[in-house]
Image (tube, grey):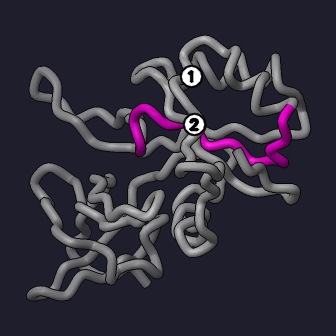
């Protein structure tokens, strides 16, 4: 297994719904020189006739880790309960590509690693983001469902295209 010598982002495949638990164990067991994130997104959901904002995982079953992957860390990770595997190809640990990280950083460049709700204005078929994390990546919006308050966004993650739903609020006019 070839490991990288410089700091990079890696992806851990973990048991679904165990992401936060695994992250807490990792923070305790692996150390402060690593950063662990479980990206989340804020969505509006209707329950008992009322709308609520809820947080859902962006990539269920994954924890992102930033640091230097050495043999010692690799074996520490293997001992953590809930981790299925460190994503790798046949003989090399996979890192998250810089271009994929750029979009993720735009979306989750905040302390709680949560993608908030974006405000958008729709005119004919044109979508204009007026506020929020989707600003600047309008071209990746595949579909808008104003009634449900969601936008389907195309993201590349681990060399695969993934469609994720992100929270939106449709406004009547462009705010100045």
Residue 173 percent across, percent down from the top left: 25, 79
The residues tagged by marks 1 and 2 sit, at their Cα atoms, a distance apart of 7 Å
Identify the mark nearer the N-term, 1 or 2: 2
Q: Which residue, given by chain and number where applicable, does mark 2 sit on?
A: 12
Above or below, 38 relative to 122: above
Residue 14 percent across, percent down from the top left: 50, 26
- Looking at the figure, which quarter contains the N terminus? top right
Residue 7 included in the magenta stretch of the image: no
Residue 127 percent across, percent down from the top left: 24, 81
Query: Is disc 1 placed on a helix, strand or loop?
Result: strand
Residue 65 included in the magenta stretch of the image: yes
| Residue in front for this viewpoint, 150 or 92 | 92
| Residue in front for this viewpoint, 3 or 33 | 3
Label 2 near label 1: C-beta < 8 Å? yes
Q: Which residues are magenta?
A: 58-71
Question: Viewed as shown, does residue 6 lie left or right of 165?
Answer: right
- Looking at the figure, which quarter contains the C terminus? bottom left
Above or below, 131 relative to 157: below
Q: Which residue, given by chain and number where applicable, does mark 1 sit on?
A: 83
**Quadrant in the rendering for residue 6:** bottom right
Query: Is disc 2 placed on a helix, strand or loop?
Result: strand
Question: Residue sitting at 61 percent across and 20 percent down?
Answer: 22
Question: Viewed as shown, does residue 117 lie left or right of 1?
Answer: left
Q: How many marks?
A: 2
**Quadrant in the rendering for residue 80:** top right
Q: Which mark is residue 103?
A: none
């Amino acid at each position: 297994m070839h490991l990288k010598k410089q700091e990079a982002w890696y992806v851990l495949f973990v048991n679904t719904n165990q992401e936060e638990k695994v992250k807490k164990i990792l923070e305790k067991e692996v150390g402060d020189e690593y950063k662990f994130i479980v990206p989340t997104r804020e969505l509006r959901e209707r329950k008992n006739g009322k709308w609520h904002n809820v947080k859902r995982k962006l990539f269920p079953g994954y924890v992102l880790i930033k640091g230097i992957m050495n043999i010692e860390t690799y074996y520490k990770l293997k001992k953590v309960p809930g981790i299925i595997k460190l994503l790798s190809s046949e003989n090399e640990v996979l890192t998250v590509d810089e271009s994929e990280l750029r979009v993720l950083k735009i979306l989750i460049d905040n302390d709680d690693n949560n993608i908030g709700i974006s405000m958008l204005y729709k005119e004919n078929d044109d979508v204009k983001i007026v506020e929020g994390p989707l600003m600047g990546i309008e071209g990746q919006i595949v579909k808008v469902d104003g009634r449900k308050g969601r936008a389907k966004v195309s993201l590349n993650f681990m060399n695969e295209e993934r469609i994720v739903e992100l929270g939106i609020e449709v406004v009547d006019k462009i705010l100045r």
